[in-house]
Amino acid sequence: MGAQSNAAPIIIKKKKIVGGDGHHGGAWKVAYADFVTAMMAFFMLMWLLNATTEKQRKGLADYFSPDVPVNPVSGGGDGAFGGDSMFSEETMVMNGSGATNWRPADARQSRGSTGVDAEGGDRAPHEEFTELEALLQGRGGESLVSDKLLRHIVTRVTDEGLIVELFATEDAPLFEERSDRPTDLMKELARVVARSADIVTNWVAVGGHIRAHPVVLAESPVWELSNRRAERTRLLLESRGLDSSRVRRVTGHADRELADRNPMAARNNRVEVIFLRKPAG
């Protein structure tokens, strides 16, 4: 009989691992972390939009925008880029190649793209134009316009220039009925426009508009009254600081250019102060 061994037998146990439920893994944690990060970024964006001015937001956007030229050489055009950087408004890739802001093409000048600053300066003309419009719309950091006055100011850009429209409402007239005597509201609006006008040097035009009057009147006062109100506005602006040499024309438009479909509506009683574009050439 052979010798017997006292060593214990070796037992190998094989365990079959079955995949458990997904919640035992860690992938969901990564996805959740990405979701929380995205939500935090979203709320920070909402807070920034609410807590900053338009100029501050533009500064933030410029900070994150690289200044990379689109083309190494200007193609000679004067369109959206004209050989400039895609992200910078003033940087030219090749000065003198093609049309530029300093040497605009005739076509650009003919459509009034030379800006509204009559004297020029370090800032681009369209930047001064934007600043003036923002100031009159109460979007500046230190606005001169109260909420009460904002209800009576509308601005728009045309080929002629920046039009600042001061208009009356049913409960807040600019002038006393059938006269050119300004109300306190009109005096305050004139003060705001005159003070805002100091940031540019453009020439100024003033136009008076009034609502239609009943046809039963023997003599309609629309022409005379609109002229008198335009002239009164000029005097108000000059008395509040506007240089009289900047005024190029004062016009009464009667009731020929209505702002409201109802010709008798008070909204048609308005004055337009126009900051004229610089003549081409």
Image (spheres, rainbow, N blue to C red):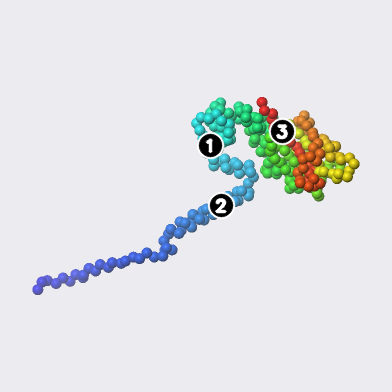
Q: Earlier in the sequence, mark 3 or mark 2?
A: 2
Tell me which residue sits at (51%, 35%) in the image: 70
Q: Specify the amino acid type for callout 1.
A: Asp
Instruction: Name the residue carrying label 2.
Output: 42
Q: Residue at x 82, y 43 (%)?
A: 212
Give x and y (percent) for residue 272.
76, 39
Whether residue 230 is visible to the viewer of this picture, yes or no, is no
Q: Secondary structure at mark 1?
A: loop
Q: In the rendering, at what x and y percent does residue 232 appear?
A: 83, 37
- Report which residue position mark 3 lands on: 276
Residue 20 in the figure: left or right of residue 234: left
Q: Amino acid at mark 2?
A: Phe
As helix, strand or loop, the secondary structure at mark 2 comes to helix
Rendered image quadrant of residue 240:
top right
Q: Secondary structure at mark 3?
A: strand
Quarter assignment of residue 81: top right
**Marks 3 and 2, how far apart at CA:** 42 Å
Q: Is residue 42 visible?
A: yes
Quarter that holds the N terminus = bottom left
Residue reaching furthest front?
Answer: 215
Q: Quadrant of residue 136?
A: top right
Residue highlighted by disc 1: 67
